[in-house]
Image (cartoon, coloured by chain):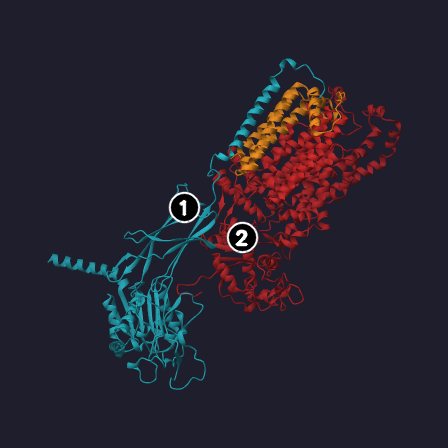
Amino acid sequence: MRLPLSLLLVAVFSSIIAAAFQGQSNVVLVVFEDQVMLKTHSRFVDSLKAIGKTVEVKQANSESFDLRADGEYVYDSIVLLCPTATKMERKLSLDSLVRFVDAGHNLFVAAGHGYSDYTSKVASSIGVDLDYKRNKMTDHQQPFQSLDDGSHTIIRAGGLVQSKYLFGDENIKASDIVFSGPGATLFTDNELIDKVMWGSGSCYSTDDSRRPLSKIPRVAGAASVLAAALSTRTESRASYFGSIDTLSNDAFDKAGKKHEKALTSFLAWTVGHAGVLRTRNLVHSSIDDSGSLANEFRVKDTIKFSIDVQEWDGGKGVWSPYVADDMQVEFVMLDPWVRERLHYSGNENGTYTATIPVPDQIGVYKFNIQYFRPGLSPIVLMKVVPVRPYLHNEYERFIGMASPYYASSFSMLIGVFLLGLVILYGNKGEDGEHAKAD
Amino acid sequence: MSSPSPLHTQTQSSSGSIVHDVFHAYRLNVPASLQVIDAFLCYVLATGIIQLIYAMSVGSFPFNSFLAGFLSCVGVFVLTVSLRMQLSERNLKDPNNRWQGLSKKRAVADWLFCNFILHMAVLNFLG
Amino acid sequence: MATDAVERKSADQPAQTASPSAEENSQVLFTRPQRELLLRTLILGLICLVSFSIRLFSVLRFESIIHEFDPWFNFRSTRVLVGEGSYKFWNWFDSRSWYPLGRIVGGTVYPGIMYTAAFMYNVLHFVGLKVNIRDVCVLTAPVFSAFTALSAYALTKEASDDAAGIVAAAIMAIVPGYISRSVAGSYDNEGVAITAMIFCFYLWTKSVNTGSLFWSGLTTLSYLYMVACWGGYIFLINLIPIYVLVMLFSGRYSHRLYVAYNTFYVLGTLLSMQIRFVGFNAVTTSEHLGAFGTFGLLNLYCVKNWVQSFTGPRVFKAFVRWLVFLAMSLTGSIVVLAFVTGNGGGMTGRIRTFLDPTYASKHIPIIASVSEHQPTSWGSYFFDLHITVYLMPIGLYFCFKKLTDGNMFLITYGTFAIYFSGVMIRIMLVLAPAASMLSAIGISETLKFAMRSLQADDDDEDLSMRVANPSAEEAKSQQSGPVAFCLCVGACVLLFQYVRHAIWATSEAYSSPSIVLSAKGRDGERIFFDDYRAGYYWLRQNTPDDAKIMSWWDYGYQISGMGNRTVIVDNNTWNNTHIATVGKAMNSPEDVSYKIARKLDVDYVLVVFGGVVGYSSDDINKFLWMVRISASVDKSVNEKDYMTSYGGYTVDDSAGKALTNSLMYKMCYYRFGDMARDPRGAFDRVRQTVVKDASSIKLKYFEEAFTSENWIVRIYRVKKPNARGWV
């Protein structure tokens, strides 16, 4: 009797502990508009399950969205697939959503034709400026034939960022991706948002595609943003995709495998499955033993700089070393004085090292790593370190070239001493004799 | 004022003979004890000039060492000239100089004091 | 002390006083020389006490605090010296000022005052008095002012006589021109440097008077101390050669002069190079060229004399011709070589301003902007020197009347000090001792004449005198009795007025710590504005340790000293471009300033605004200097944009467009319209106008972090972009 009870207790405790360790990093909240969308967009959401995330599905008209439990965030990411849902503000306020993202959690927001104010506010908070809700992106030259109903509002994308992290495959072509919805632009005073998919040169945004244009469209051509991504400073990601209609199962069937793969990879990227980098162990020390502390260097020193860069392997669920040969570290004081390539040392921590020669200029420098690659988390590191001049006893002690000067100084010293002796005690006998006046 | 030295009959004014004349007059009129000091002064002068030539030809790289060495020569020269002034009888008698009570020992002691300062500074500056 | 037997200058007094006193010995307790010694010591002791006490106004009124701006840096350095030792101080690299350039403090500072205060501190601690370093620093200058008075006594005694020396010490102790830079709390270089300078002058005069190598050696040691203390040693190293030249050309050459000057020049130059800040400047810059030239000239003159002494006239003439030719060719070749190789060291801007007072305002605005570098006005001469202004010519007259080597030095010193004090108000400090000493000679000689006449009536002791003097003079001195009496009374009245003025000037003008402001309220009581310290302590307690503060360079030392934070620019003003960058950030629109602030990693911006209480040394009044300095580096900044259309500088409706857009304007007047203190609304008490659009100022990239009680110090935080990239 006791054994099953203890086993039960152990099981309960371990599950609690397991839940505590796991709960943070694997639960994704998906918000659908209604029951219908639950079925029509199931494959998009199932892709999350395929990468190992636990998906919690709610609908826009659910009672509450409690993001926190016991002071901690329950969800790791939020996927908003409810562009036209109104009344979301009361349940999942923009403020709490923004704080969720700032706290280091991911967000995916999809917009569609006739989106609500709530959606446009969410998009604005991550730097995306949506076009009028009645407008749709129209392309008379590249419509997607199999889905098109004659209005040319289902278009192919014109360009995208070639990145295996973002879209699963480096060789994917923009024209493989189908889009139907409003266009957008990016706010210029946000430095972190970037477009990942944009329209072709022949697309433009209009509310009635059958009528000719009466004025210049607000969003057109390659300046139109179809999908955008933001990597925040708190290591989370916020993505926007303007076409919820092409995320449906039906669209996946008609648009092809590549389209499905690209968009599900984009979603996987957003929730942190691919392309997540982290840095550890920034170490800087002096190579020559000049006796200085590791956090203060001297001019003409040599610094050994090392940092561990690791990449999250979503498949295996571990941090593996990130291997690349294009990272560099700068040694900056107002302007970069030294730039050195970081070399991978080969170990399993992903340690990169560089040897930085300290310039012959004193000042307060900083190590600067700014590594931006599409699809990868940005690495922005700054570490301030002063560089001091030589101490008074760090110069060469005896300089060969100066030997005549050494010799002469000492000879003067000795000469003075001797002369003094001679004057005082020499010619003792002739002291009294005052010679002819000088 | 001293009695004028015997005039020489050479009337050429070439520089070589001027030097000769001066040197001859010097030999006659300057007492031996002061000539010793003068010899030392020549040595100091020579050392200084050698250093100057060396610095101008090879470069004055450890400039502080050059200055230390050169100034030690100049300093010793200047101080010894001052000592010589204070030891020469004619100067001691001149009321304008107010050196009536200056004994030889006192003069040498002052001279050594200044040399001490000079050489401490030189050694510090030498590098 | 055989070499000390200097003859007394007072011609009529008998040289020996021993004989009459031998008779008195049996009757009185002290002999006459002993009485004189006692009296002299007492008087000098009292003078020292007076000079110390008069400087204590600010300590008694406010508290023991370091004043002004520069002393805060000296204080911080002294703390480092005392806390971490001499090697650390000598090698100190300060990474918390001039961010990110850093500053090698060990090599860019005159360490004399720090070592002096550290020495006093260590001595006191050794003896067992555990005094706070701040108190030692605050009281350094008054203590040294007592030494200055004693040095003035010694120098005047060398130049003239004992009586004049005592008067000189008395006048020097309280002359307002010197008090201004040496009150308690003014822990600045000049407080110690003037002592060193007068002492060095005394030793120099002594060595010229005695021709002893010992005194010359001591002169060079005190010169080393002077070089360690202040950049004004340039005055010294140029005045002494000028004096030598004056002596040469007036035919007063003697071997004493040769001994004194040569020792001084060679040893002094070598010793001055030991101070890192001076370094090789002593042999490469134009400022030291005069001394070198005089050295050469003096030696040549001496060689000529020496050769003349043992050769005949004919040989000698030929030798002289040869010597002159050699000298001129040597000089010419050296000058040509120097300029061809580019080693003809230029003069620093400050020194050029001395020779051409308009130079700085044309070329280097940062030198022209310092308030201490402004030309002296007539009023300040009288305010700082009072009666010595017109007693000085009297002293000069008496010096000329009985020219001696020592007198000549005072004349030279006084003349050149008068000229240079007209260039910069700061040099009044150098004129004050000269004025004191010369006027002391004037007073002393006048009083001597007067007293002699008074004494001639009634003394038996003057039997010997009457015998010595012809009767005509005796009759004259009897007749001038009443005149002499008036002279004495007049002199006393003058001196009383001088003392009154000195005390009043010190109390009213020179005793404000300038870090604590005070004003008299309506009912006469004193109100204190402690805003500066409130702002700096806010920084100290509410910002991260590595926060960087951007402000105008005036406040740099105070922020470093009291706030203990990294600053971008400070009072050392060694890098004009960096200051111009900060100036550009202050006078540009907000987005340009924001970029500059981000580039310099600035976290907080501090401005000083006096419009609420009427404090007129605020940043809006200094603003045009910020524009000028940034215009000297960045040609796109145009001063006219910041002025009104008719060329004036106001902040009302006609203010220049660039001014109202500038960051400084916005930060000073942000929320000023909300202040309800004045019924007229946003009324700026300093500029005496209503400020244009004060209520509508919005700041996008900066947010207000702290405003002190009277709005004098305002601190703004630089907004960094948040996690999602928004500012």
Give whichever of C547, A252 is nearer the camera: A252
Q: Chain of mark 2?
A: C
Does residue C591 appear left or right of residue C416 in this picture?
Answer: left
Q: Chain of mark 1?
A: A
Q: Considering the image in quadrants, where does the N terminus of chain B appear?
A: top right
At 36% from the left and 57% from the top, the residue drawn is A326
Residue carrying label 1: A302
Residue furthest to the bottom in view is A211
Label pair 2/1, CB-CB below 8 angstroms? no
Visible in this render: residue C493?
A: no
Tell me the shade of chain B. Answer: orange
Q: Position of residue A405 (x, y in %)?
A: 54, 32
Tell me the shade of chain A. Answer: cyan
Residue carrying label 2: C569
Q: CA distance from mark 2 to mark 1?
A: 29 Å
Secondary structure beneath dot 1 equals strand
Crowdedness of circle 2 by 10 Å Cα count: few (<14), some, many (20+)? many
Residue at mark 2 shares a chain with residue at mark 1: no
| Rendered position, A62 above or below C370 | below
Q: Position of residue C318 (x, y in %)?
A: 74, 30
Amino acid bearing label 1: Thr
Q: Position of residue C225 (x, y in %)?
A: 59, 36
Residue furthest to the left in view is A1
Give whichever of A187, B88 is nearer the camera: B88
Tell me the shade of chain C. Answer: red
Visible in this render: residue B77?
A: yes
Q: Quadrant of residue C222?
A: top right
| Rendered position, A152 above or below A238 | below
At 62% from the left and 30% from the top, the residue drawn is C217
Q: Quadrant of residue C484?
A: top right
Q: Quadrant of residue A188?
A: bottom left
Amino acid bearing label 2: Val
